[in-house]
Amino acid sequence: MTHALIVIDMQNDFCPGGALAVTGGDEIVAGINTLMPDFDHVILTQDWHPAGHSSFASSHDGKAPFEMTEMPYGPQVLWPDHCVQGSHGAAFHTDLDTDRAAIIQRKGMNPAIDSYSAFFENDRKTPTGLDGALRSLGITELTFVGLATDFCVAYSALDAAQLGFKATLRQDLCRAIDLDGSLAAALAELKQAGVHLA
C-alpha cells in the first residue's frame, strides 16, 4: 500500500503574523518535518490566489472579512486578502522541509471561485488534477496535516474519502480557525465520512 503525507497550506499568511493567521499555526511545522520520512511520498498544497480574488472581502463593496456572501456555486466566507501569487504570504513557512515534496499542488487560482480542497474547487466538481496524480503514483492511503483543520484540511480529507482513498487526519499536526463552531462541525462530518481522526 502506497501511503502519502498531504501537507495542507503551510504558508506564511496562515501562520502568526500572516494576513489570515491561524493560532499556533507555526507550532506544527517541526512535527510535520519529523513525520515526512515515514511516508512513500510527500505532497504539499499551496493556496495561490490572483490579486483581487472573488473570495477576498476587499473585492466586495461594503463587506468585511469573515462575512458570508452567495456565489454562483453557493455560500462563501469572505476572507482577508491572503496568499496572493508570488507574495511573501503565499510562500511556504521558512522552516517547512519542501525538499521531500513529490508534488506541489496549487489551488484557488481561478479568480471567480475559491478552492479549499486539494482535490476540487468550491463548486465541488471542478478537479484540481491531484486525484489523477496520486493514482498515477499508485497511492491508496493519505494522511493529512496542516492548516486549517476546519477548512482546507477537512475539505481535502472529505474529498479523499469520497474518492476512495483511505484517509487519516492527524489532529495534533493541524490547527483550526474555528469560525462560529466550524471545527466541531468539520470533525463530526469527517467522522461520518469515515476519515480516521488520529
Image (spheres, rainbow, N blue to C red):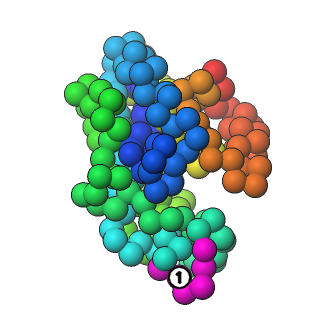
Instruction: Answer left or right for 96 relative to 151.
Output: left
Task: Point out residue 116 in the picture as x, y percentages from the top left corner.
Answer: 51, 54
Instruction: Answer left or right for 121 relative to 179.
Output: left
The quadrant holding residue 136 is: top left
Q: Residue at x 28, y 57 (%)?
A: 87
Q: Is residue 119 visible?
A: no
Q: Residue at x 29, y 27 (%)?
A: 97
Q: Total marks drawn?
A: 1
Q: Which residues are magenta?
A: 59-64
**Residue at numbered disc 1:** 60
Task: Point out residue 107 in the picture as x, y percentages from the top left corner.
Answer: 38, 55
Q: Is residue 60 magenta?
A: yes
In the image, farthest residue toward the top = 38
The quadrant holding residue 85 is: bottom left
Instruction: Answer left or right for 146 relative to 135.
Output: right
Q: Report crowding for label 1: few under 14, some 14 to 19, many 20 or more residues within 10 A (C-alpha).
A: some
Image: 39 above or below 8 = above
Quadrant into which the N terminus falls: top left
Q: Nearer the viewer, residue 161 or 28?
A: 28
Amino acid type, label 1: His
